Amino acid sequence: MNATRRVNRVLKGQPTIEGAGVHLRRAFGFSDLPLFDPFLMLDDFRGERPEHYAKGFPWHPHRGIETITYMLDGEVEHGDSLGNKGVIRPGEVQWMTAGSGIIHQEMPRGDAGGRMGGFQLWANLPAAHKMMDPRYREVKKEEIPLVRLENGVEIRIICGKVEATQGPVQDIVIDPQFLDIFVPRESELVHAVRPGHTAFAYVFEGSGGFGEPGAAPASNGNLILFADGEEVAVKTGAESVRFLMISGKPIGEPIAWRGPIVMNTQEELKTAFDEYRSGTFTKHR
């Protein structure tokens, strides 16, 4: 019999302002380390008031991490020092590995009703890979497989594997799983997660019970951090639930973090910011 993961804790996202004035909710961040290792931060930037997001995230650097953006509503226009530029639309993903250093900007636009929103996850890179070459992946909606189970559960696979179906983002150092899961009302889901991996769910529609047997209730804006085990269980009642299911292999290394740069030592942080000021930050052509 597989060991169902208990719920370690249930968190509620906290309002904060980032970039040039973007209002968002931080599901977890700096103060929660190392509970979420290898993940650093999850931001929920859904909103309906353009004045709360229109100024966006002007040009800024990243080093030592990966940033994963998943859009639900509206669009984000982006550009970076690799020469990439484009628009992330609803149902699409930008998976950016900053590695040795990248400079980019992200400028949100609402839909016809003013809605704009999605999520950005920061994933750490181990010391051996922090200075790897930057790379960039833009995943279109039609590239993301949708698995439908007999009980009406729907799973969009961005990264990782469900049954025999593999997501489009592969060869990531921390071996992550990034899923968008819908469980209809009066239903249950038991989902396998690799033992030893950090795993959490973030609810963004409806409500459900998580853990065994659906013991921890959670609704829109709640994050559920699971203890170790082989699977996670979700049970719904009169309401359906939709959530992100994310897991990855812990790194277990020291973290030196300031702003958009995450290294292992304060000396490495100082070097990164000195290089950014001197114009030698990016190592790629």
Image (spheres, rainbow, N blue to C red):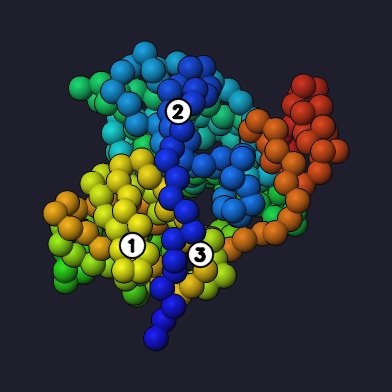
Residue 215 numbered tag: 1
Q: Which residue is mark 2?
A: 15
Q: CA distance from mark 3 to mark 2?
A: 26 Å
Decide: is 261 above or below 148. above
- The Cα atoms of the two marked residues, 1 and 3, are separated by 14 Å
**Depth check, front residue: 206 or 111:** 206
The answer to whether residue 32 of the structure is visible from this angle is: yes
Residue 151 appears at what percent x and percent y?
A: 16, 69
Q: Is residue 126 left or right of residue 59?
A: right
Number of the front mark, 1 or 3: 1
Residue at disc 2, secondary structure? strand
Indicate which disc, 1 or 3, sits on the residue closer to the N terminus.
1
Above or below residue 108? Residue 244 is: below
Quarter where residue 94 is shown: top left
Q: Residues within 10 Å of mark 2 (few under 14, many from 20)?
A: few
Residue type pointed to by label 1: Ala
Amino acid type of the residue that numbered disc 2 sits on in the rendered structure: Pro
